[in-house]
Image (cartoon, rainbow, N blue to C red):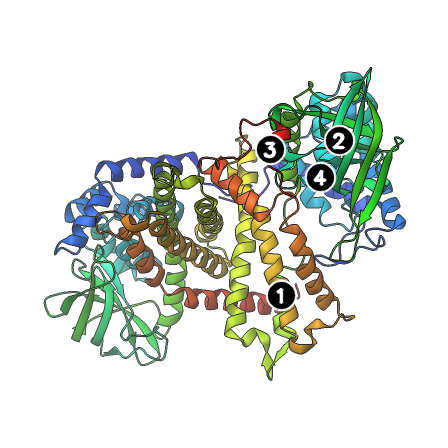
Amino acid sequence: MNLDFSDDQKLLQSEAQKFLQKEQSLQRSRDVLDGEQALDTDLWQQIIAMGWTGIRIPEQYDGLGLGHLELCVVAEELGRCLAPVPFSSSVYLFTEAIIKFASDAIKQDLLPKLVSGECVGTLAITEQLLAPTEHNINTQVANNKVSGTKIAVPDAGIATHSIVICKGVKGIDLRLVELTDHCNVQKQDTIDDSRGHFSIGLDNVDSLLVGGEGEGWELLQNLLDQAAVMFSFEQIGGAQATLDMATSYAQQRFAFGRAIGSYQAIKHKLADMYIKLTLAKSNSYYGAWALSTDSVELNVAAATARVSATQAFNYCSQENIQTHGGNGFTWEYDCHLFYRRAKLLSLNVGSLATWKEKLILGLEKTQTANVKQGV
Amino acid sequence: MNFNDSEQQAQFRTKCSTWLHDNAQRKTQAGSDNPHGKRDSSEFLNAARSWQKKKFDAGWAMLHWPKIYGGLEASPLERIIWGQEEAKFDVPQGIYEIGLGMAGPVMMQYATEQQKQRYLPPMAAGEEIWCQLFSEPSAGSDVAGLRSKAVQDGDDWIINGQKVWTSGAQFCDYGIIVVRHDPNVDKHAGMTFFFVDMKSPGIDIKPIKQITGGSSFNEVYFNDVRIPDSQRLGAIGDGWRVAITTLMNERLAVGDANGVDATEAFEWAQGQDDHGQALIQNHAVRESIADWYCQASGLKNTKLRTMSALSKGDTPGPEASITKVVSANKLQAIGNFGIDSLDMAGMLKTERSEVHDFHNAWLGSAGLRIAGGTDEILKNIIAERVLGLPQDPRADKGLAFKDIPSGK
């Protein structure tokens, strides 16, 4: 029985934490929010120099050849300090898509460049102001040329490549496109401008197929399941940070002659934050296990981790503002940075409702499989 | 990460399950009805007694105890493994948990060697059943507000007062009790701890009828009951410190709220009709079941994290402190869901075992949210002991017990 990270993985985590603290990642996140940039380029370069972009990339492609668990502990730390870098889009989504589904030729071309930072990738899914489905993707691919418009694409401003979800001849395809000057990439305002999001207009842009033709939607679900686990670690990192902030404020802030943390209304609120965070953390560990062992339970485990991590970070970040009272509503205090990021993270691989539905569908599928096997 | 036992743990698990297979019936399905009679019946008590004796003879009864008192000196993890394996079998539960879980550790820590040798083995063997006498009509969450009196008389103490919520008092042989020997000092300083023979003259036991209709608890009245000073546990005035040791153990003993869970709700929703389609197709129901599944999974994986720490020889973190507050509330929500899913017919008691289970969950959970620490007290404990928030200012601080406002 070992539902825990190894000593080496914990060491990696504590080094990541120290590094991000030293580099004042939270302040950098605020600076990106306040400024015109869509990321902190200097922090991103340092992260590349530390090798984190290549954690999962095999050594033959210059990566570190480590596993998903190493990625999970780094994700928790990036989430704790709201790192304003394109890590999630390029590493959890794009790099994973290349490792899992791309041809050897593409791997040989892109993986070393993803390690060195020469290449940054993203995943373009959404097109309209509603949840994307297999039936409402309108971006077309014909003769390997992609045309259409994607919105809310993370980090497309710095990304050199994108996997684009397209409607092909046989169904949905994953198409790899290079984001050149021919693509119309426009920054979009979001609820959390510490992480840049963009629209991409594609007009007859060359592309390569990734994965089987017409299998794109299924492959996308698998990619999202994987990414959901890593996002859940970002979420528990953020939730822990807000619980720590709220706890420390409740100890120091006095009202009616006593620390507000001595009032049960505050105690119970903070206990509820701790409870939600603990459930989310334990489920994220389960998700990490399923991810690292390529378990058939991954879809259920990922949905479980994702739902509880979204609930935990949403709740903790909102009640952290409440605990801070009026101060929590000011731009000056950091509470809103976490409130924004919590909401952003709760949407960017699908909403809470979407993942609850995935969880129930997963349970229904497991049951059908068990019946067929006579379990 | 893996969910596998180490070689040594696997061997131990096999040993447990082999013995269980030879001595008990495996459950046919999770939560299957026990065939040992109703909880309050004498058949059930006899079944529990003989199962406990069987376990004791093989060393399993209190496997973490020293061998001289009938244990196996097993590690905390081995104790968990045994618990996991035993839970797969249909065995009578609920009679011995309090005595063994609370009186056992206190006797182990505070009784004389001679007393330990006299009382611990029969306790483990189930030949003598123990109860716990802490709560009083005016001392619930604030147990230290208890007012049962102890007056020293030669080598004896004379006890007068009333205890309440005493599980199993009607069939217990001994009890651990905390009483007030001095109302003129600070409330925490005026208490002393004893163990008492429940057959002593002057003890009167009356069952409490619960909202479930059952009677697992009792009121216990003490009228001039004599306890020899040799049965004092800890020093005079040390009662609170000894009681706290016990309460810590209670928090470990009162864990999961057992009953219907997300899986049962899911299966029920698949079979139940809702306006012409299966209830599971209802979006509100799907979302609720997803919530309960995440909570159940979160608790299960929290336990596995605790086990992982024990497995490595580390001290587990405080994460298990969330167990009861989450599981009792989940049970209440699922009970409500099941009953509501029958619409106007939800009020009826029926033969359907699922409906019966939902009714039990709905009623029983109301008690589980209180027993062993209310939701509110448990959240205070998380806030103060885990997060380090300050205690509430107290209206009883620095006052002699007799001067503390007591309301009605």
Q: What residue is pinned by disc 2?
A: B176
- Relative to B336, is B394 on the left or the right? left
Secondary structure category for the residue under label 4? loop
Does residue A101 appear in this view?
Answer: yes
Q: Residues within 10 Å of mark 2 (few under 14, many from 20)?
A: many
Which of pointers 2 and 3 lies earlier in the amino acid sequence? 2
Q: Secondary structure at mark 2?
A: strand
Q: Secondary structure at mark 3?
A: loop
Picture coordinates of residue A87, whole percent (x, y)? 26, 52
Q: Residue at x 19, y 45 (%)?
A: A43
Discs 2 and 1 share one subunit: yes
* Amino acid of disc 3: Ile
- Of badges 4 and 3, the one in the foreground is 3
Q: Is residue A258 left or right of residue A81?
A: right
Disc marking residue B336? 1
Question: What is the chain letter for disc 2?
Answer: B
Disc 3 target residue:
B404
